Amino acid sequence: MSENTLHGGVKWQSPSNIALVKYWGKKPGMKQIPQNPSISFTLSKCSTETSIFYEESDRFGLHFRFDGKENPEFQTKIAEFLKEHLSDFPFLNEMDLNISSHNTFPHSSGIASSASSMSALVLCLLDIERVVNGEKKIDMKKASCLARLASGSACRSVFPKMALWGATDAFDGSCDDYAVSLENEIHPVFRSYHDSILIVSDAKKAVSSRAGHALMDANAYADVRYHEARQHVATLLEVLKNGDLETFCRITEAEAMQLHALMMCSEPSVMLMKPNTLRIINNLYEFRRETDIPVCFTLDAGPNVHLLYPDSDAELVERFIMDELERYCVDGTWIADHVGDGPSRC
């Protein structure tokens, strides 16, 4: 290897996120542009670690391993993304990449691994670009924009605590092309919020996110949904400032149920909740009535339940999970996560 050959390695850890106001439906004919704005918590423990060793070459080369093993499906997805966006990463035309990636959470747990994995990948690539161009830091707005092109929700994972993606009159600077940080816009109670993820099923998703979004194109309730989601975003932005946990719970749960109702009203109809999903929700309702603890649930596009609650109530809620809800989880599996500080260079 020539002494002047550019080579080295970068490594980033990037978290998953859980949407409170859901992104469900894309604008037709546009690349990953949402029909409505969304708001999410950035998680802490559920993340993807990605490393790239790079070396100058006479052509673009890619080698990918997931959990130490070759994964042709993931490699093809990454290769297609990179080739489609070589104009954004022109240095890749003369670079050979060896990419290794793994999740800190079970791949089959139903957590949004595309958000964490694609944001980690983009951050690694921009770190290489930083080295190539002799720059000091990464432009996180650019990182969010490129992550969006790889996986819509990934654009929110590059920011700490909470993020907003999608244009809304309720927040100056919001944009469809990238997410913006809400870290400095939230009440202290939300800075340490917990997300306990109850694994109801570890089966592969019955419907991919891409297929699920496509179902919204012909959904009879789509326009009403997008209007209500915009209203929820405006209201939730105020709630996040004033710490109104009752309204927070109401909007968060309404968004979760509406997401699944939309799938059930699609053609073809899709039912992703399981009997134990409903058992957990009903048990939660009873627990909340008895204790007045502001714990609520949300759901991704799957059967697993995210319980959201303040740090001050963590001991009682986690005891409730162990005593009453573990029985509804696969092998008693649940993940005790919380709002996190965003991606980090390793």
Image (spheres, grey):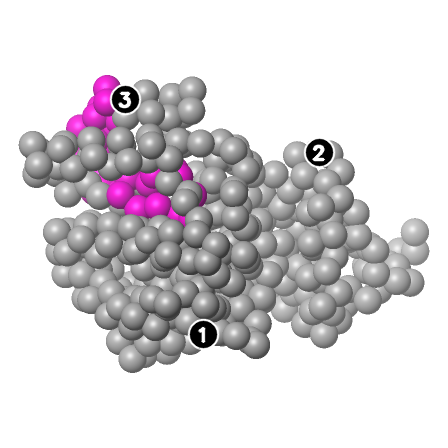
Report the residue at 29% width, 63% height from top: 184
Q: Is residue 82 magenta?
A: no
Neighbour tally class for label 1: few under 14, some 14-19, many 20 plus, Cα within 10 Å: some
- Please state which amino acid type lies under the numbered disc 3: Met
* Image coordinates for residue 160, horizontal then vertical, percent: 39, 55
Report the residue at 60% width, 61% height from top: 150
* Image coordinates for residue 274, horizontal then vertical, percent: 37, 35
- Please state which amino acid type lies under the numbered disc 2: Gly
Residue 18 appears left or right of 240: right
Q: Is residue 174 visible?
A: no
Report the residue at 22% width, 43% height from top: 296
Residue 277 appears left or right of 240: right
Name the mark nearer the viewer: 1 or 2: 1
Neighbour tally class for label 2: few under 14, some 14-19, many 20 plus, Cα within 10 Å: few
Q: Toward the viewer: 240 or 330?
A: 330
Dot 3 lies on which element? helix
Residue picked out by circle 2: 68
**Disc marking residue 243:** none
Residue 315 appears left or right of 108: left
Residue picked out by circle 3: 322
Magenta stretch?
Answer: 297-324
Report the residue at 28% width, 36% height from top: 278
The first of marks 1 and 2 along the sequence is: 2
* Callouts 1 and 2 close, C-beta under 8 Å: no
Q: Total of numbered circles in the picture?
A: 3
* Image coordinates for residue 297, horizontal then vertical, percent: 26, 43
The first of marks 2 and 3 along the sequence is: 2
Q: Disc 2 and disc 3: Cα gap in Å?
A: 33 Å
Dot 2 lies on which element? loop
